[in-house]
Image (cartoon, rainbow, N blue to C red):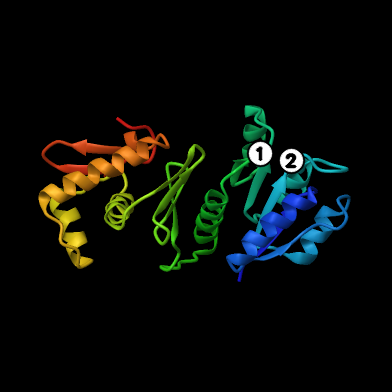
């Protein structure tokens, strides 16, 4: 079980985030005295820190700087402020990510999982959430959640998207996609694959992600991570 220190003075939001994180088996601690954040951090020794920018006494930048002077613990900023300078400042101070409020909780969870896996070499094949182009892809719920909303996919569509994401920025041939669906004991013809890909793109267009599934004529398809060509 990973321990998360949530530095948030809005008690309603704190409890909401804590409840959701607890459902994912994270141990969550808050701050009792916002003038003693570093001392409480040292006592808790969390695996990851979530910190708001606007806090009593001193702001989140101050405490990020103080924590960074003692530890390389992963830090994610949560902020309702939309100034680009805030994001730049947080990165310069050594934060690992910056999440704008209000946020989709699935996106936050996916970011937390990705950072924990990277920093602690934690691997769990059962993890259902993956991040792609800033969106959370839930392989169990068959959903894709971005800042612009959530779309529900069919089983075939999520399996196709999973194959593309697992090989992101690389071309996946039609034969590979058909074979992967056959391996899942699903009958998929070449025409069925085309229909499912078109439906997948159309749904992803609803949350501005359709452009990140590219067709490579004569080769196959590619899920782009970054700027589409």
The CA distance from mark 2 to mark 1 is 9 Å
Q: Earlier in the sequence, mark 2 or mark 1?
A: 2
Q: Quadrant of the C terminus?
A: top left
Assess disc 1: are there few (<14), some (14-19) or many (≥20) residues with their C-alpha within 10 Å of its C-alpha: many
Q: Quadrant of the N terminus?
A: bottom right
Q: Residue at x 66, y 44 (%)?
A: 77
Query: Which percent across, then down, holds residue 37?
Result: 82, 53
Which of the pair 42/197 is nearer the observer?
197
The residue that disc 2 covers is 53
Q: Secondary structure at mark 1?
A: helix
Q: Quadrant of residue 97?
A: top right
The answer to whether residue 70 is visible is no
Give the mark toward the camera: 2 or 1. Answer: 2
The residue that disc 1 covers is 90
Q: Residue furthest bottom?
A: 1
Query: Which percent across, then down, holds residue 226?
Result: 39, 37
């Amino acid at each position: 079980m990973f321990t998360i220190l949530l530095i948030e003075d809005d008690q309603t939001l704190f409890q909401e985030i804590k409840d959701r994180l607890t459902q994912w088996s994270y141990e969550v601690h808050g701050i009792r005295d916002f003038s003693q954040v570093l001392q409480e951090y040292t006592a808790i020794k969390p695996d990851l820190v979530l910190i708001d920018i606007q806090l009593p006494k001193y702001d989140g930048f101050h405490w990020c700087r103080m924590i960074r002077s003692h530890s390389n613990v992963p830090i994610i900023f949560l902020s309702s402020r939309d100034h680009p300078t805030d994001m730049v400042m947080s990165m310069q101070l050594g934060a690992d990510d910056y999440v704008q409020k209000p946020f989709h909780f699935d996106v936050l969870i996916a970011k937390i999982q990705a950072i924990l896996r990277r920093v602690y070499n934690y691997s769990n094949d059962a993890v259902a959430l993956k991040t792609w182009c800033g969106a959370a892809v839930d392989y169990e719920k068959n959903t894709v959640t971005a800042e612009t909303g959530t779309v529900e996919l069919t089983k075939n569509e999520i399996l196709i998207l999973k194959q593309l994401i697992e090989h992101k920025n690389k071309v996946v041939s039609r034969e590979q996609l058909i074979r992967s669906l056959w391996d899942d004991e699903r009958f998929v013809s070449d025409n069925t694959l085309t229909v499912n890909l078109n439906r997948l793109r159309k749904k992803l267009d609803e949350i501005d992600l359709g452009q990140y599934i590219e067709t490579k004529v004569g080769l196959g398809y590619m899920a782009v991570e970054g700027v589409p060509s």
